[in-house]
Amino acid sequence: MTTIIRVMVLALVMVVSTIASAQDFQGVATYKTQRKLDIKMDSTSTSAVSKEMHEQMMEMMKKQFQKTFKLTFNKEESVYKQDEELDKPNTGMGSGIQIVAIGGGGGSDVLYKNTKEQRYAEQVDTYGKIFLVKDSIEGIEWKLGSETKYIGEYPCFKATYTKEVEKMNVSFGSDDEEETKETEMEERTVTAWYTPQIPINNGPDNYQGLPGLILEVHDGDLTIICSKIVLNPKEKVEINEPDKGKEVDQEKYEAIMEKKAKEMMERFRPAKGDRNNGNSFSISIGG
């Protein structure tokens, strides 16, 4: 009986989707993002960071990853951009402790996608320099599931895929030891919820390729949830492909990012003799 009900619901949704796809529609979807953080201090770190300061640091980093984005879309194109907000202050806590955010994701960044032509253009402000990353959209091998749930008023279906990601552990040794980094690969399952009621194969950030707009994503510690959708707004939305910045492909941009990240790590790394005196400590965050 449960299977029959699911089939009937899917059939109804597909009928609605067919009607909607016959129309020239566009819309704006608002997404909230957040990332779980779990920073553990070893014996060396705790000598420089008190429990109270550690909690304060965790709260500040948590706020760094709580953002609001808007996806402006039509059948074939989209622009994903952080919603306008007041500039966040530099994350400094005194006592020589600084939190260094490595990577893009600033309020001026713009991600344009063309799902028909399977390409994207991302304008990224990195360390005060504008890059224009242009490349092909990589296909995602989604596995469509039968689980369903409602997100707001929209019936959604579950889809998953697995990918290999880098897991980096950074540690500081004693005064006579250098900083050590151990990078290993781990398999991660990404879960998405999409609604065929909005029949576009698009979604927030770099998630796309499903038979309906993606409204929710769980990717490791990252969660993206749609909080509002406006279809066919009175004022026609504009979708413009970004054209400013030094043009590079994704591979070249990642190489630049890796080099800059190493430079930043070196710049903020505690000097020998300062690691255990409570005057210097740094944390770098990527992604």
Image (spheres, helix red, strand yellow):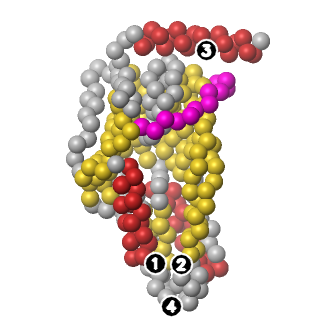
Residue 243 on image: x %, y % = 22, 43
- Mark 3–mark 4 Cα distance, whole angstroms, equals 65 Å
Number of the label disc, if any, that sits on residue 10: 3
Three-letter amino acid code at disc 1? Arg
On screen, residue 8 versus residue 263, left or right, reads right
Bounds of the magenta span? 137-148
Mark 3 crowdedness (10 Å alpha carbons): few <14, some 14-19, many ≥20: some
Residue 213 drawn at (x, y percent)? 48, 27
Alpha-carbon distance for marks 3 and 2? Answer: 54 Å
The answer to which image quadrant residue 42 occupies is bottom right
Q: Do the residues labelled 2 and 1 touch (CB within 8 Å)?
A: yes
3D distance between C-alphas at marks 1 and 4: 12 Å
Q: Earlier in the sequence, mark 2 or mark 1?
A: 2
Q: Nearer the viewer, mark 2 or mark 1?
A: 2
Residue at screen point 36% across, 58% down: 88
Three-letter amino acid code at disc 2? Glu
- x then y, percent, for residue 170: 56, 70
Q: Nearer the viewer, residue 47 or 205?
A: 205
Instruction: Tell us which disc is closer to us: 2 or 4.
Output: 2
Q: Judge by depth and name the residue closer to the eye, 70 or 260.
A: 260
What residue does disc 2 label? 179
- Residue 266 in which image quadrant: bottom left
Q: In which quarter of the image is the N terminus?
A: top right
Which labelled disc corresponds to residue 273?
A: 4
Mark 1 Cα-neighbour bin, 10 Å: few <14, some 14–19, many ≥20: some
Point out the tag, 3 or 2, that comes first from the N-terminus.
3
First-in-chain label (2 vs 4): 2
Kindly identify the amino acid type of the residue bearing the numbered disc 4: Gly
The residue that label 1 is drawn on is: 269
Q: Is mark 4 on a helix, strand or loop?
A: loop
Q: Are marks 2 and 4 in contact (CB under 8 Å)?
A: no
Q: In this view, does 187 lie to the left or right of 268?
A: right
